[in-house]
Amino acid sequence: MAESVLTALTERFGDAILETGTYVGDEIAIVAREQLVAVLTFLRDDPDMAFAMLTDLTVVDYLEQTPRFEVVYQLYSLSKKHRVRLKVHVDEAPEQCWVPTATGLWHAANWAEREAWDLYGVRFEGHPDMRRILMYDEFVGHPLRKDYPQNARQPLLRRPDATPTDDQTTRLLEDSHDRRTSG
């Protein structure tokens, strides 16, 4: 059934569907960024498609390839019992490292897009609350990028709820197993 989804996408969106294929039973379409929202809307709203559920949204980092990133959308149709995976290629240049938000289509996109931005640095244009979700505001960089330094040091912050005598919030204990920092 999902193969008919790929056929419908190709017929309806033409050149906006850059590539389609099947891998171990999963139907996959690579979509042009400029048509992403239109494709997602069609898949959700068309009664023959009925992809009511965004089950996952993530980013894949292909360091040293161009384009470097792929934003991956996993969609599922509850009524038709089929799934499809959409991918959008994203360049790493700061002015090109974005895709349009899907939060207007699925509420599940909200936190998934924030997580993708926080950990990989891919922006979601039009997102209503694009701020960090896992890392603290002062964190520098995006820790799941493959070029993120393994031993990167981040600003040391005092917990706002810590009492002034709580030295565990400002340095490691002397017998700590973590030897990445010096006392």
Image: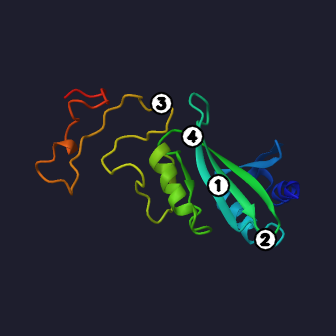
Q: Secondary structure at mark 1?
A: helix
Foreground label between 2 and 4: 2
Seen in the image, is 43 located left or right of residue 69?
right
Which numbered disc flags the more N-terminal residue, 3 or 1? 1
Which numbered disc flags the more N-terminal residue, 1 or 2? 1
Q: Are marks 2 and 4 in contact (CB under 8 Å)?
A: no
48 in relation to 55, above or below: below
Q: Which residue is mark 1?
A: 34
Foreground label between 1 and 2: 2
Q: Secondary structure at mark 3?
A: loop
Front one among 97 and 4 = 4
Residue appearing at x 82%, y 61% in the figure: 12
Q: Which residue is mark 2?
A: 46
24 in relation to 137, above or below: above
Seen in the image, is 101 located left or right of residue 36?
left
Which numbered disc flags the more N-terminal residue, 2 or 4? 2
Residue appearing at x 74%, y 72% in the figure: 45
Q: Identity of the amino acid at label 1?
A: Glu
